[in-house]
Structures are given as structure tokens and as C-alpha cells.
Image: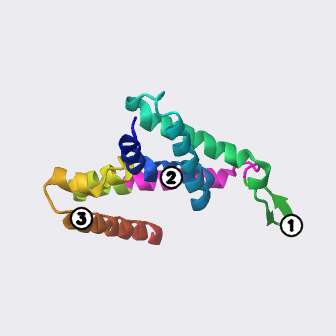
Amino acid sequence: MNLENYMEIYQKYFRFARKVAYDVVRNYHLAGDIVQDVFAEMFEKRGKLDAEQIKYWIVLNVNRRAIDQLRKPYQRMEEWRNGEIVSPLLSPIQPEEIVLRKEEAEFQKTALICLKEHNADWYDILMRIVIGDESYQDLALAYGMKVETLRVQVSRARKWLDKKVYEFYED
């Protein structure tokens, strides 16, 4: 892997890797630091890594580093609840919280299904940008439209989803 390939991989996977780290540590700046460390390690090992497996290597290492970061004693934040000190990492998940998480996951699934039924192109575009981490330029080329038009489509899809979320929480 030469420097050009490294930069291409960096630009392609940096946002996705930061999201993986953020999902674990819930701190934007810490997630960025973790991702930088992983990419620095990748640069050091650039001759030993398999190019076909690089995305999986990045995700695996980012996830592991984020978990390791949470395990460090100075990263555990405590808070007061009902006159007691509670550590969010050590406290058990309450049944109500499990039910709320399950309902939220079901709603997200339902909202995406509704989006797919409403406009399949919007659904495909959002999935490819958010989950597939494709660039706007590549996706616009694949759909045969300008990047600006694609951004408008993404904005409309997100506004439609926001409206559905609002309707859900109103009920």
C-alpha cells in the first residue's frame, strides 16, 4: 500500500470509522482520536495488511480501541441519581430502558420501511450514503445526476423521515 492508496482508504473510511467509535464512546472528540490512532497503526502496518480486508480491519480495531478506552478508569463518569453515585458503565440496564430501546428499534425499522414504500430511490440513496459510506460524487455518478441534485434528494428524504419521527412521538 503506497501513500496514495492510504489516503484513498483514509478518505473512504474515516467517517464510517468515527461513527463506529462514537457509537461506543459517545464522545465526538474521543472517537476522532481513536480513529486517528487506528489509521496511524494502519499506516505503520501498510505492507502487512490485506487490501481486500482493510475495511473489516479498521472497524474491528476501532471498536476494540473504543471499548478499551471505556475500560480505562479515568473514562468512567459517575453521576448522582437519587442521592447515590451511579456509574453508567457498571449499573445494570433497567427493564424500562430495554423496552424503550426495543420500541425505538422497531420504530426505526418501520420508518425505513415507510420511506422505502414512499420513495425507493430516497431509501436506496440514504442507505448507500449512511450505511455504505459512499461519497456523494460516486453516488451522483451512479444515479446519473448532479451532486447538488443528490444533496437535495438526501435533504428531502431526511425531512420526510423527521416528519415521520415527529408524528410517531406525537402519538
Of badges 2 and 3, the one in the foreground is 2
Name the residue rendered at 33%, 70% in the picture: 159
Mark 3 — residue? 153
Numbered tag placed on residue 18 in the rendering: 2
Residue 84 falls left or right of residue 5: right
Q: Could you tell me which quadrant the C terminus lies in?
A: bottom left
Q: Amino acid at mark 1?
A: Gly
Name the residue rendered at 68%, 42% in the picture: 68
Q: Amino acid at mark 3?
A: Gln
In the figure, residue 126 lies in which quadrant? bottom left
Q: Is residue 22 visible?
A: yes
Identify the mark nearer the N-term, 1 or 2.
2
Q: Magenta includes 93?
A: yes
Q: In front here: 30 or 118? A: 30
Identify the mark nearer the N-term, 3 or 1.
1
In the figure, residue 75 lies in which quadrant? bottom right
Residue 97 falls left or right of residue 54: right
Q: Residue furthest left?
A: 144
Name the residue rendered at 15%, 60% in the picture: 145
- Determine the CA span between mark 3 and mark 1: 49 Å
Q: In front here: 106 or 83? A: 83
Name the residue rendered at 50%, 40% in the picture: 43
The kind of secondary structure element at disc 2 is helix
The kind of secondary structure element at disc 1 is loop
Q: Which residues are magenta?
A: 89-110
Numbered tag placed on residue 83 in the rendering: 1
Q: Magenta includes 1?
A: no
Identify the mark nearer the N-term, 2 or 3.
2
Q: Amino acid at mark 2?
A: Arg
Of badges 3 and 1, the one in the foreground is 3
Residue 131 falls left or right of residue 37: left
